[in-house]
Image: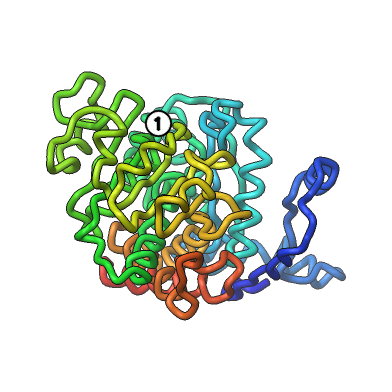
Amino acid sequence: MSSSAVSTPLPASASDPAPTREDVFAAHLGGKLSTGLTTPLDDARDLAIAYTPGVADVSRAIAADPSLVSRYTWTSRLVAVVSDGTAVLGLGDIGPRASLPVMEGKSALFKAFGGLDSIPLVLDTTDVDEIVETLVRLRPSFGAVNLEDVSAPRCFELERRLVEALDCPVMHDDQHGTAIVLLAALRGACTVQGRELRDLRVVISGAGAAGVACARILLAAGATDVTVLDSRGILLPGRPGVAGEKASLAEVTNPRRLSGATAEALAGADVFVGLSSARLPEELLSLMAPGAFVFALSNPDPEVHPDVARRYASIVATGRSDFPNQINNVLAFPGVFRGALDAGARRITEAMKLAAADAIAAVALDDLAPDRIVPSPFDPRVAPAVSQAVSEAAQIDL
């Protein structure tokens, strides 16, 4: 595959049987990744070109002009998928080795949906200093860093430190990929209902990596009333347990200065966004405003079952693929990184994330409905649209 090609898998039929445990383990046997060749190695001439002596000419050229590395190596399309295994899926802190199948899967998605090469790197340390130093040392080998499944609150510091230390795009997908797709989905839901984001009262359950990023992108997109809950209740300046990232978020959310727990937050709310795995009792849904949106995104077990949520909400979304309106990060991250690398960006900025969300929402417009507020991950238009939008936004920032 050339570096400019984007290959999109064929969608699975709705009638396809669910994979068995045996199917899953068979597909992972020996891992899901391998390296491939972009140039032939069939004879002595090919060997002399790909390796010695020919390769020495390329190495000399790069030594004389380091910028040529992006042209003559794979770094311009190589993403390092980095994890310490501390917050893997819904499994928690399972360690780097057990996280590797997930990171291999993420790399496979980069290739399938974004045409980008990717290498999983699982690190046997949870020390932020050590992770930063490791990636700084490895920087000549890759073009971008996708942080994955790093627990909060360390993930916030780690991302900030890496953005400062590395001269390449860095994004913690659990934060920003989720936030981008959530914003796109809310734009779709608003269009279906003829509403505006700025008029919605939004409640986010969960103040971890995804919850913080979702709150911030919604505010950046024009939302004016966002309230965030952690396990101890509504975030409010000065509340016990509100420190660090939560404290800074509390200063810019909850404009009505609500206090209390989920019931107090949901009274009259238009949108519920679940990112905490905390169960949402059905009786609390009845407190929401008419025509509410319920995005129960914890996976595999949503905060409230979609069938229950539909009794109270006009639009329901989950993180699962077996219900309508799946909020799936694969709609975002392949195109975001592809656009950033194509543009030669050194950072993934807020403007690039907003552009990605707008691009996803625009693709959905052709087939918009209450049960189709975002496009399918298999829609071949998504990754190119996101990539182009992010690349254009990056050019403005350059």
Q: How crowded is mark 1: few (under 14 residues within 10 Å), some or many (20 or more)?
A: some
Query: In what element is the residue under mark 1?
Result: loop
Which corner quadrant holds the N terminus? bottom right
Q: Identify which residue is drawn at 55% across, 26% down.
A: 93
Colouring convention used in this rendered image of the protein: rainbow
Q: Which of 221 and 37 is in front in this view?
A: 221
Q: Identify which residue is drawn at 19% across, 49% down.
A: 225
Q: In this view, does 208 lie to the left or right of 337?
A: left
Which corner quadrant holds the C terminus? bottom left
Q: Identify which residue is drawn at 49% across, 55% down.
A: 327
Q: Is residue 385 above or below residue 105?
A: below
Q: Identify which residue is drawn at 37% across, 54% down.
A: 293
Whether residue 214 can be seen here: yes
Whether residue 30 can be seen here: no
Q: Image quarter for residue 388? A: bottom left
State the residue position of label 1: 152
Q: Nearer the viewer, residue 238 or 143?
A: 238
